[in-house]
C-alpha cells in the first residue's frame, strides 16, 4: 500500500499541472501571431508525468529531456521568462536564442538540456549519472523518453551500460502511443515496453501517466531504489498527446487517429481528474483554484511581456559561440 | 635528463595519457580493448593497473551509446578520453559526435562545455580493406564545433594529446596506423603543442607542399630527394585540420606561388580541396599556376596487395607531381624518378618490422 500523500504535495501537483497547461495554452493562443518562429511540441494532456516525477526529486538531482520538453523544463522549475524568450528567439532566452523550443536548459535547477533526435539524449543522461557516480555524488539523473526511444539501438546501449555499472539513473518512458503519426502497433510487436527494460535487468514499474498522484508515488519508489544504490530504474507511464505532434492545433481530422480515441483519453484529463479528486477530498477549494489560476495568469502574462520586449541576439554568430575557451 | 631520448609514436601517446591521468583526477580513459593485453596498439598498456578500473576501463561494444555517455560525463566536468581501434567503428557514433558533442555548447547558449577527446586510428591497412582502414578526417573536419587533429611525429602526438585533453571542446584525435612505430626525440617532461598551428618542416621557395599525418612522412621523403635535385620545397605539416592554420599556408603560397596538397583521404570533397579552395579564394594573385592535389582515388580501400599498390600515393607520386607543376620536361622527370633508390620494403607495410596481422 502506498502511504497517504501530504496535502501540500497534492496541491503542488495540482498547481504545477494547471500552470503548465495554462502556459502551453498561451502558446496556442499566441502562435498564430507568427512571432514564435520555431516548432513547438506541446505536452497538453501529458503534464502529470513531468509534474509527478519532478515532485519526487531533490534539488541536487539532474533532469534531461527530448523534443517535447516544455512540461519537463517547467515542472523542474526552469525559468518561465527565459522559456518564453527562447521560443521567441531572444538573447534573454534560456539558450540565448540558439536553441528554440526543442533546446531548453536551466542550470540553476540542474535541467541539463533537451534535444530532439529520438533517443539521442538518453546516453547523454546516462553519462551524467556516470559522472555523478564517478564524483561520488548521491544524486539521481532522470531522462524523459518517449515510447519510440526503445526502438533506437542507443536506448539499449545506454541501459545495458547503466545496469552493468549500476548507475543512478531513472528512465521515464512516456508512452503516448504515437511517434509523430505512427501508432505503436505499427512500430513494435505486442509486448510491454517495460519488459525490454526488465530484460536488461533494470528495476521496472508501470503506471497510469495521467494520474499525477500515482506517477509521484511510482517515481518516488523508483528514485528510492536508485538512491539506495540498487541501480537504474525504468518507469513506463501511459498517456496521450491531445494536440498535433508539432504545432498548436488539434489534428483528429487528418486521419491517423479517431475522434473517439481522443475523446476517450480526453476523459482522463490529468488536470480535471486531479481537481475532482482533490475537491472531493477537501484538499482543494474553488477559491484556491481561482487563486492558482490568477497566480499562473499573472506570471504567464509577465513572462510573455518579458519575452516580447527582449532584444534579439546580435549576429553574426561568432567562433566563440561555437567553441568554448 | 636525456634530451635525446627517442620513443615511438605509440609510446608518446601512452606517455601523454599517463600524464593526463596522473595530473587530473577528472580524466578517465575508456575504449574497447583499453585494458586488454594488446592495449590499443600498445598505447594503453598497464594504465588500468596504475590508475584502477574506475578510471581506465573497457566498455560494451556500444560505440554510439558510450560516446553519448562520455558526452554526458563531459557536461558534468569530467574529461573523457574515448578510443576506437579504427575510425571505421566511430561511424556508429556519428549521431552523438555530430548532433551532441559538436553542438551542445552552441545550442545551449554556451552554458555547458564538452571537453571530450576521441582517439581514432586511420589509414593504410595491411590488407584490411574497405571497412578497417579509411581516413575520414574530412568527414569530421566538416563539422563546426569539432576540433580535428592528426599529428605526424611522436613529439607532436604527445604534445597534442595533452592539449586535446586540456581543451574544453570535443577533439577528434586521428592517429595514422603507419605512424605508431615511428621514432622521434620526445622529452620526458610534459609539454603541449597547440591545436590549430601547422609546422614548417622544410624551408623552400619553389613550391608549397601541404601534408598531414602519414602523408607528411611521404612528403618529407619527396622533399629531401628533390633537394638533391636542387629543388627547394616549403613543406608544411598541418597537424590540425580543423581549425587549420590558414596563415602559415597563405604566407608560404605568397612566397612560392605554387601549391600542392597531399591527403590520406579521398580526393572528392576532401581536405586537399578545401585548402586549395581557401588559397584560391584569398590568395589568387599569388598563384603562378593552378594548385594541385594528391589524394586517394574515389574507390573503397582494396584488400589485395596487387590492388593497394597503386591506391596510396607515396613519395614517388609526390615527386612526379611537383616536377610536372614546376614545368619539368617528361624526360627530366623520368630521369629523376629513375635515380630514386628502392627503399627495399614491400609497399603495404610502414617498415620491415611490420609483419601483420593488424
Image (tube, helix red, strand yellow):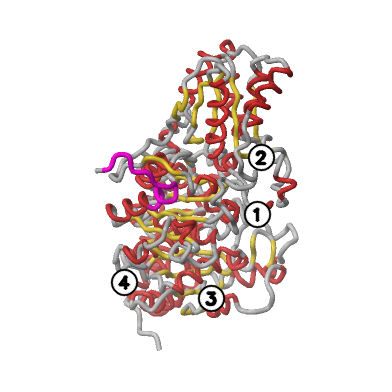
Q: CA distance from mark 2 to mark 1?
A: 14 Å
Depth check, mark 1 against mark 3: the one in front is 1
**B193 is within the stretch colored magenta:** no
Residue B6 is one of the magenta-drawn residues: yes
In the image, are marks 3 and 4 on the same chain?
A: yes
Residue on which the image places disc 3: A197
Residue at label 2?
B312
Q: Secondary structure at mark 1?
A: loop
Q: Which residues are magenta?
A: B2-14
Q: Nearer the viewer, mark 2 or mark 3?
A: 2
Q: Nearer the viewer, mark 4 or mark 1?
A: 1
Secondary structure of the residue carrying tag 2 is: loop
Up the image or down, B194 lies above or below B115; here it is above
Residue B128 is marked as 1
Placement of the C terminus of chain A among the 4 image quadrants: top left
In the image, what residue occupies the spot 43% across and 78% down? Answer: A218
Amino acid at each position: 500500500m502506498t502511504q497517504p500523500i501530504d496535502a501540500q504535495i497534492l496541491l503542488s501537483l495540482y498547481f504545477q499541472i494547471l500552470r503548465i497547461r495554462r502556459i502551453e495554452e498561451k502558446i496556442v493562443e499566441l502562435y498564430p501571431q507568427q512571432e514564435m518562429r520555431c516548432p513547438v511540441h506541446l505536452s497538453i494532456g501529458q503534464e502529470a508525468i513531468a509534474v509527478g516525477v519532478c515532485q519526487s526529486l531533490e534539488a541536487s538531482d539532474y533532469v534531461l529531456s527530448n523534443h517535447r520538453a516544455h512540461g519537463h523544463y517547467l515542472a523542474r522549475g526552469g525559468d518561465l521568462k527565459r522559456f518564453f524568450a527562447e521560443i521567441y528567439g531572444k538573447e534573454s532566452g534560456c539558450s540565448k536564442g540558439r536553441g528554440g523550443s526543442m533546446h531548453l536548459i536551466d542550470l540553476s535547477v540542474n535541467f541539463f538540456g533537451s534535444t530532439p533526435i529520438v533517443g539521442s539524449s538518453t546516453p547523454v543522461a546516462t553519462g551524467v549519472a556516470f559522472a555523478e557516480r564517478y564524483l561520488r555524488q548521491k544524486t539521481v539523473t532522470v531522462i524523459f523518453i518517449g515510447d519510440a526511444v526503445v526502438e533506437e539501438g542507443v536506448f539499449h546501449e545506454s541501459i545495458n551500460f547503466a545496469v552493468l555499472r549500476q548507475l543512478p539513473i531513472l528512465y521515464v518512458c512516456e508512452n503516448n502511443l504515437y511517434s509523430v503519426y505512427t501508432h505503436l502497433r505499427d512500430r513494435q510487436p505486442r509486448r510491454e515496453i517495460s519488459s525490454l527494460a526488465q530484460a536488461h535487468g533494470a528495476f521496472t514499474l508501470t503506471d497510469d501517466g495521467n494520474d499525477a498522484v500515482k506517477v509521484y508515488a511510482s517515481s518516488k519508489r523508483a528514485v528510492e531504489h536508485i538512491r539506495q544504490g540498487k541501480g537504474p530504474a525504468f518507469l513506463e507511464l501511459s498517456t496521450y498527446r491531445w494536440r498535433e505532434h508539432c504545432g498548436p492545433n488539434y489534428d483528429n481530422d487528418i486521419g491517423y487517429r479517431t475522434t473517439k480515441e481522443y475523446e476517450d483519453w480526453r476523459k482522463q484529463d490529468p488536470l480535471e481528474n486531479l481537481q475532482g479528486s482533490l475537491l472531493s477530498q477537501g484538499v482543494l477549494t474553488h477559491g484556491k483554484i481561482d487563486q492558482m489560476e490568477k497566480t499562473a495568469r499573472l506570471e504567464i502574462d509577465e513572462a510573455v511581456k518579458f519575452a516580447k520586449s527582449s532584444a534579439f541576439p546580435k549576429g553574426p554568430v561568432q567562433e566563440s559561440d561555437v567553441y568554448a575557451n | 635528463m636525456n634530451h635525446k631520448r627517442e620513443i615511438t609514436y605509440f609510446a608518446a601517446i601512452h606517455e601523454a595519457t599517463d600524464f593526463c591521468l596522473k595530473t587530473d583526477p577528472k580524466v578517465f580513459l575508456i575504449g574497447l580493448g583499453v585494458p586488454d593485453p594488446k592495449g590499443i596498439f600498445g598505447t594503453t598498456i598497464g594504465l588500468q593497473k596504475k590508475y584502477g578500473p574506475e578510471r581506465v576501463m573497457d566498455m560494451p561494444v556500444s560505440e554510439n551509446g558510450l560516446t553519448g555517455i562520455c558526452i554526458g560525463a563531459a557536461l558534468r566536468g569530467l574529461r573523457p578520453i574515448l578510443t576506437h581501434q579504427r575510425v571505421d567503428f566511430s561511424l556508429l557514433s556519428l549521431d552523438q559526435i555530430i548532433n551532441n558533442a559538436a553542438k551542445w555548447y552552441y545550442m545551449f547558449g554556451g552554458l555547458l562545455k564538452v571537453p571530450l577527446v576521441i582517439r581514432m586510428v586511420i589509414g593504410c591497412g595491411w590488407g584490411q580493406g574497405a571497412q578497417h582502414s579509411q581516413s575520414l578526417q574530412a568527414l569530421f573536419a566538416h563539422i563546426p564545433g569539432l576540433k580535428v587533429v592528426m599529428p605526424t611525429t611522436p613529439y607532436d602526438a604527445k604534445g597534442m594529446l595533452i592539449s586535446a585533453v586540456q581543451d574544453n571542446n570535443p577533439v577528434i584525435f586521428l592517429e595514422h596506423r603507419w605512424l605508431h612505430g615511428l621514432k622521434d626525440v620526445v622529452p620526458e617532461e610534459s609539454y603541449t603543442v597547440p591545436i590549430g598551428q601547422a609546422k614548417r618542416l622544410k624551408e623552400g621557395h619553389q613550391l608549397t607542399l601541404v601534408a598531414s599525418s602519414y602523408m607528411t612522412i611521404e612528403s618529407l621523403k619527396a622533399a629531401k630527394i628533390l633537394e638533391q635535385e636542387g629543388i627547394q620545397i616549403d613543406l608544411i605539416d598541418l597537424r590540425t585540420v580543423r581549425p587549420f592554420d590558414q596563415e602559415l599556408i597563405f604566407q608560404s603560397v605568397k612566397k612560392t606561388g605554387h601549391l600542392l596538397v597531399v591527403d590520406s583521404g579521398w580526393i572528392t570533397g576532401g581536405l586537399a580541396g578545401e585548402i586549395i579552395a581557401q588559397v584560391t579564394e584569398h590568395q589568387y594573385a599569388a598563384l603562378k599556376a593552378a594548385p594541385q592535389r594528391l589524394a586517394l582515388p574515389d574507390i573503397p580501400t582494396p584488400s589485395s596487395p596487387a590492388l593497394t599498390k597503386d591506391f596510396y600515393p607515396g613519395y614517388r607520386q609526390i615527386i612526379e607531381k611537383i616536377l610536372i607543376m614546376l614545368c619539368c620536361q617528361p624526360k627530366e622527370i623520368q630521369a629523376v624518378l629513375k635515380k630514386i633508390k628502392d627503399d627495399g620494403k614491400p609497399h603495404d607495410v610502414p617498415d620491415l618490422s611490420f609483419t601483420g596481422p593488424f
